[in-house]
Image (tube, helix red, strand yellow):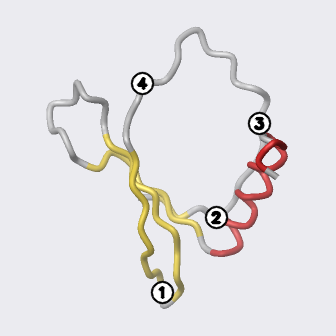
Amino acid sequence: MAYLESLSALDPLDRGRPHSVSDATWRVATREGLRVLQIDTYGSPERKDKGTVSQSIQLDATKAAELVAICRSVFPEIG
């Protein structure tokens, strides 16, 4: 699990192959008494242990606001 301390921009990603498809869920969690958004991703359908959380990230209110701003700059059509 990762609690995001910073979000930094990198150069655009030019990959020869796309990432595999997976599902994600989100929930509200608590970290040191503060509310955080937790996003869990799951392995691909070919994964041996189906339904097992693969990665988790947690964002506090400040990082969530930063992510919203990033999303709006990358996807201006969402407003």
Sequence order check, earlier mark of 2 and 3: 2
Sequence order check, earlier mark of 4 and 1: 4
Q: Which residue is mark 3?
A: 10
Q: Which residue is mark 1?
A: 32
Position of residue 59 measured from the top left corner of the image (x, y, whole percent): 58, 66
Secondary structure under the numbered disc 4 in the rendered image = loop
Q: Amino acid at mark 3?
A: Leu
Query: Mark 4 or 3, which is nearer the eye?
Result: 4
Q: Amino acid at mark 2?
A: Glu
| 26 vs 12: above or below | below
Q: Residues within 10 Å of mark 4 (few under 14, many from 20)?
A: few
Position of residue 37 measured from the top left corner of the image (x, y, whole percent): 51, 69
Q: Are marks 2 and 4 in contact (CB under 8 Å)?
A: no
Instruction: Give whichever of 4, 25 is nearer the camera.
Output: 25
Q: Residue at x 18, y 39 (%)?
A: 50
Sequence order check, earlier mark of 2 and 1: 2
Secondary structure under the numbered disc 2 in the rendered image = loop
Q: Which residue is mark 2?
A: 5
What is the spatial separation of the Cα atoms under label 4 and label 1, in whole angstroms?
34 Å
Instruction: Give whichever of 42, 3 is nearer the camera.
Output: 42
Secondary structure under the numbered disc 3 in the rendered image = loop
What is the spatial separation of the Cα atoms under label 2 and label 4, in whole angstroms?
26 Å
Q: Which residue is mark 4?
A: 20
| Residue 42 falls in image quadrant | top left
